[in-house]
Image (cartoon, helix red, strand yellow):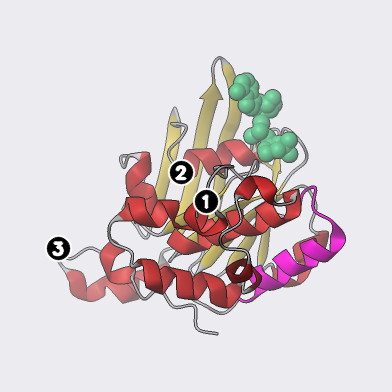
Amino acid sequence: MTATSSSGAAASSSTASGSSTSAAASTVPLLSVAAVDVKIETVQVLRGFSLDVPAGTMVSLTGRNGAGKTTLLRTIMGHLTPVAGRLSFDGADLGSKPAHIRAALGIGYMPEDRGLVPELGVEENILLPVWVSKTLQVEDRLRFVYEVLPELKEMRERRALQLSGGQQKLVALARALAVGTRMLLLDEPFEGVAPALSERLATAIGILRGSSISVLIAQSEMNHADALIDREVVIERGANA
Ligand SMILES: Nc1ncnc2c1ncn2[C@@H]1O[C@H](COP(=O)(O)OP(=O)(O)OP(=O)(O)O)[C@@H](O)[C@H]1O
Ligand SMILES: [Mg+2]
């Protein structure tokens, strides 16, 4: 399985002192969250939270219900704005970039609630962010997604609303894979999924190990992904535990 970011050129900088890019990538974490504070309305949900995801690794963000996992992932995607702290991706400041730019950096997001469009077909749901990106090639991305999740090819014309909850998780993973050429943010991918499908999801995510794609998995416990994870970061009431 090759999972290289063939479209990585679209995301990399073409300006300035470009020759040091790969050397820098090996020392700077791909994603860095440093002492981030996030408030939702008046409640401070994240309190000085920090986490690094080194390039090519799988990191578990582990914490119980209400700890702030989803809040952190939504902050990384630009849906929430920190009141303090710093986010960077590939050494560049992320905080100043609007949400739509972040997907274009090659970050794929699988939200907790799956977020599929029920009336659209499986393949249409997978391709939605690819169409928005304007830089990714539909055929390339579909080939890659169906390599990792071939069973979705067989159901590509079924509407999302005809699928079981577990199948919808597979589609949501596929949609994140379609744009996540550099990094995936997976919010409780195994939650509420029957054991067989959980294993299937873990196998699919495991295919990415050793590839250039980094993965951050939010979960309340480690069991499903134990063997996949390089590093665990525990979050407790919005802070590093
Ligand atoms: N829209 C909101 N308004 C007010 N408080 C919120 C909102 N969303 C989340 N919170 C609060 O922020 C805290 C963190 O929530 P978050 O959803 O990030 O946790 P989580 O770790 O993802 O939990 P879960 O395991 O239940 O998904 C919780 O205390 C929650 O009550
Ligand atoms: Mg959550």
- The residue identified by callout 2 is 77
- Name which residue type carries label 1: Tyr
Mark 3 to mark 2: distance in Å? Answer: 24 Å
- Could you say which is closer to the camera, residue 72 or residue 199? 199
Q: Is label 2's Cβ within 8 Å of ligand 1?
A: no
- Local crowd size for mark 1, using a 10 Å CA cut-off: few (<14), some (14–19), many (≥20): many
- Name which residue type carries label 3: Thr
- Could you say which is closer to the camera, residue 204 or residue 218? 204
- The residue identified by callout 1 is 109
- Name which residue type carries label 2: Met
Q: Is residue 133 left or right of residue 128?
A: left
Tag 1 and tag 2, C-beta contact below 8 Å: yes
User: Quadrant location of ligand 1?
Assistant: top right
* Residue depicted at x 70% and y 33%: 237
* Residue depicted at x 31% and y 39%: 96
- Could you say which is closer to the camera, residue 95 or residue 200? 200
Dot placed on the residue nearer the N-terminal end, 3 or 2: 3
What kind of element bears circle 1? strand
* Residue depicted at x 71% and y 65%: 201
- The correct choice, above or below, for 18 with respect to 66 in the image is below
Q: Quadrant of residue 210?
A: bottom right
- The residue identified by callout 3 is 15
Can I make out residue 53 in this image?
no
Residue 187's x, y, as percent? 64, 48
Of badges 3 and 1, the one in the foreground is 1
